Image (cartoon, rainbow, N blue to C red):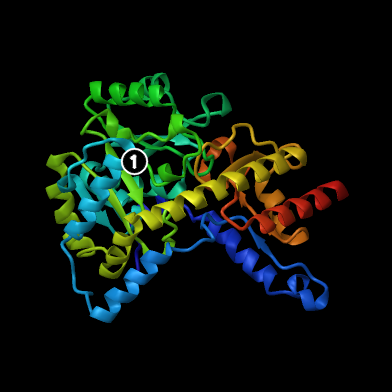
Amino acid sequence: MKLASRLERIDPFWVMEMAKSAREIAAGPGCDPAQGGEPMIYLNIGEPDFGAPPAALAAARACLDAGRTPYTQATGLPALRAAISRWYAQRHGLDVAPQRIVVTAGASAALQLACLALFERGDEVLMPDPSYPCNRHFVAAADAHARLLPCGPAQRFQPDAQTVATAWSPATRGVLLASPSNPTGTSIDPYELRAIVETVRSRGGVTIVDEIYLGLSYEARYAQSALALGEDVISVNSFSKYFSMTGWRLGWLVLPSWLVGPVERLAQNLYICASTLAQEAALACFSPESIAECEHRRGELQRRRDVAVAGLDAIGLRVPVLPDGAFYAWADCSAHSANSWDFCHRMLERAHVALTPGRDFGPAGATSHLRLSFASAMDQIQAALQRLRRELDRG
């Protein structure tokens, strides 16, 4: 049977391949405490250890008990769209009409919908390198081409307006950005983001900004939504990160008014609607109790960041730019290895610490950098740093 040619443009998700290796090693005697082994510490996957807010769990139970599980509108529960609109007003001082908000089956579905609605064969979309691999694969799945722009530490691993202007070609349809970014945890400076949007707008292009980590910003300067820059900016967001609802698969889009109808039509045909249970639970995320809990968790993640970054720097895994958001540290391992893939495998086997090599995130840092997720508990981070130091001291 012949496979579709678009699959040739979609690479494996290498972080998941590394996760398979971690599970295999974790199942062996070397990780069995009963046999003197060290249990595996997983700092490779970006998943907060907190879980959904208690109020969301209670709301989900009440929804099940009441049997409120039929299909919703493809755009989402009206009450949830209104709650998200109020969230933008309260947190960012923005007037975002509920009618511009489309609730989706995770941020992944949001990005897929946006790419399918806006891009087609022959189109080019500019993206930073490094960046989250699935984002460029959503572009590829729409038969367009993701053109990666190398961005180093001097740029905070983020593109600037001049880079975008220089790279723009007749085929360029727009930019797909992420602020804060996975894997670097760095955000685009607000003034630079405005300049990028104006550069794209002047060329008739579209700006899509992945803001799923925006709620986990640690500096007020960067905790600003791109939606403040105009209704033509498209924002992607999610309940997975700030609200810790990863497996619930619930996200949303904020769209220009004219794009809501076409995206709704796609959603109706691709998956009908997002999970009703997840939507009912998410309504409770905006209660004062839930917000207070999420803010406490954000503070805890910032403390974990400080410990993780200081610990990595101390053992020669330098983090060139302090993450101002998300829960990732993008560390340079070139002082210890010529290839981050080999280095991460060595630490997996010897230290029993799972990290993510740079291979997934673009060619610019593929061999020199690795990603550490500090979404795990503090004691796990501290133990991992101690093990890494031990193995690096051994040489």
Toward the viewer: 371 or 93? 93
Residue appearing at x 46%, y 55% in the figure: 293
Using the image, determine if residue 60 lies above or below residue 239: below
Q: Position of residue 124 (x, y in %)?
A: 32, 35
Q: Position of residue 100 (x, y in %)?
A: 18, 45
Amino acid bearing label 1: Arg
| Displayed quadrant of residue 318 | top right
| Crowdedness near tag 1: few (<14), some (14–19) or many (≥20) residues, C-alpha within 10 Å | few
Judged left or right of residue 92, residue 334 is right
Using the image, determine if residue 331 lies above or below residue 50: above
Toward the viewer: 79 or 317? 79
Judged left or right of residue 22, residue 257 is left
Residue that badge 1 annotates:
91
Residue appearing at x 42%, y 62% in the figure: 53
Judged left or right of residue 74, residue 307 is right
Residue appearing at x 76%, y 67% in the figure: 38
| Displayed quadrant of residue 378 | bottom right
Quick one: quadrant of the N terminus? bottom left
